[in-house]
Amino acid sequence: MKKKSLGINALLNGLRSMLNLLFPLITFPYVSRVLSVNGMGNYNFSSTYINYFVLIAGLGIATYAVREGAKYRDNKEKISAFSSQVFTINIIATFVAYVLLLVSLFIFGNLHNYISCILIFSLQIIFTTIGTEWIYTIYEDYAYITVRSIIFKILSMLLLFVLVKKANDYLWYAAITVFAGVGSNILNFIHARSFCSIQLVKKTNWRYHLKPIFIIFASSIAVTLYVSSDTTILGLIKGDHAVGIYSVSVKIYSMAETLLSALLTVTIPRLAMLLGKRKFREYNRVLSQVINTLSVLVLPVSIGLIMLSKEVVLIIAGKKYLESVGSLRMITWAIIFSIFSWIFNQCVLIPAKRESKSLRNTFITGIVNVALNLVLIPLWSYDGTSLSTVIAEFMVMMLNGWSARDIIKPIIFTRKSLQNLISSIVGCIGIVVVCWLCNIGWNSLILRTIFSIILSVPTYAAILILLRNEVALEMLDSMKTFITK
């Protein structure tokens, strides 16, 4: 199989992640003005409720399939057998999820007002399973799913402006959301045949597959619970206003984190394949490249967002959300810890089949995070929630790093890696100086933001090159080659 470029894959996956972020950012301001408050409430509740059943249907199959399937991808017969077994388990889990959903609708009378919207959102369960997007991740084929996403997102936005016109059109909005997210997954399933044959099979090798799948699934539940606990506890203790302020910080933080993590996602199948085939030298080389590249990108993005927090809040949310500036500045530090925690987990622990350690670390962090929220929220409201997130992300990073220490120690504690990290930190000091000078030099919000970004990028790049940062020099050589060609 032809080896795909990690750089191109990262660009394509980043583009797709950006598109997934832009869709709600473009549509939400329109929808919130058109739909009634009750309609929006029905939509949001139904969407959240269905997510739990999507989680049940998915088990931990997508993560497991990428890790295990990557080592079979050069053998069509083996990957077909593996994919069919995993797909069959996924279909059974999907059936169980639908049974549990229907039972819950009958048992809980309070859900009757939401049945129509819930049933529309429930299409996500089966379409997510049929989509078999993990096949495309295994084969690093991001071009197809990126193009597909662009087409369906554009169609969905057109449908939104045509069909959602009245206060009670929330069901149309729900249907369009499903169409945008998973509507093309039937095409995915058909196109996946170009890689391997996927079908339902009787022999699924349960004993081999289920243990790691359930461990990953339990870890997914733990992540879902501890990620959601912040907003839930904040709402119960401080009310809707605090949640509204905090939600702006979280949305901006999530956007930056998602774009950066998109660069990481594309390396997971490559690393899983190399470790599965015991190609340790090449695995260490790719992992070192990932860590050094993200060090160069994560630090300046985080520092830049901290310096421009006020400007970003005013541009995205407006003056009434200015209270979220302090919360955003605090929670932005969590991006650094979160990304490196994800590297240690997804690029090391999961490919090395250490799911139990990953699960243990996630549960410990989840318990600590809930406890911190209960202590800090009464004291500092949404700022306390942000602080608990930073502490939790730092803690899970350290735990995952310790669990993977035998693999990452020879990579992180090298002269080159430390030199790259130091040069990135010095470059970030340059960003702080540039943003501070722009804050003094321009009164205009837009001009101040634009010039802070435009001047920070070359300043940071120049410092890295002067300090002989390995990643920056490689990027410079690539640019020279591209211009020459």
Image (cartoon, rainbow, N blue to C red):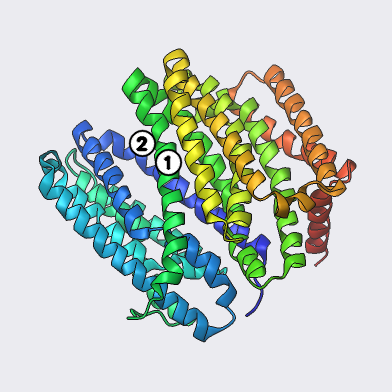
**Residue 84 occupies which quadrant of the picture?**
bottom left
Q: Circles 1 and 2: CB distance less than 8 Å?
A: yes
Residue occupying image coordinates x 39% and y 33% = 229
Which residue is nearer to you in this view: 286 or 225? 225
- Answer with left or right where residue 414 lies relative to residue 198: right
Residue denoted by label 2: 29
- The vertical placement of 29 against 350, above or below, is above
Residue occupying image coordinates x 38% and y 58% = 59
Res. 143 in view: no
Residue occupying image coordinates x 31% and y 63% = 93
Q: Residue furthest front?
A: 207
**Position in image of residue 232 (x %, y %):** 35, 30
Which residue is nearer to you in this view: 421 or 398? 398
Residue denoted by label 1: 25
- Picture disc at residue 165: none
Residue occupying image coordinates x 45% and y 59% = 150
Q: Disc 2 on helix, strand or loop?
A: helix
Which residue is nearer to you in this view: 115 or 227? 227
- The vertical placement of 279 against 323, above or below, is below
Kind of residue at disc 2 = Pro
**Position in image of residue 128 (x %, y %):** 35, 62
For label 2, the crowd category at 10 Å Cα-Cα, with few meaning under 14, some 14 to 19 and many 20 or more, is few
Q: Quadrant where the C terminus lies? A: bottom right
- Answer with left or right where residue 137 lies relative to residue 458: left
Q: Quadrant where the N terminus lies? A: bottom right
**Position in image of residue 55 (x %, y %):** 35, 53
- The vertical placement of 400 against 444, above or below, is below
- Answer with left or right where residue 412 lies relative to residue 2: right
- Answer with left or right where residue 173 lies relative to residue 227: left
Which residue is nearer to you in this view: 234 or 242? 234
Kind of residue at disc 1 = Leu
Q: Disc 1 on helix, strand or loop?
A: helix
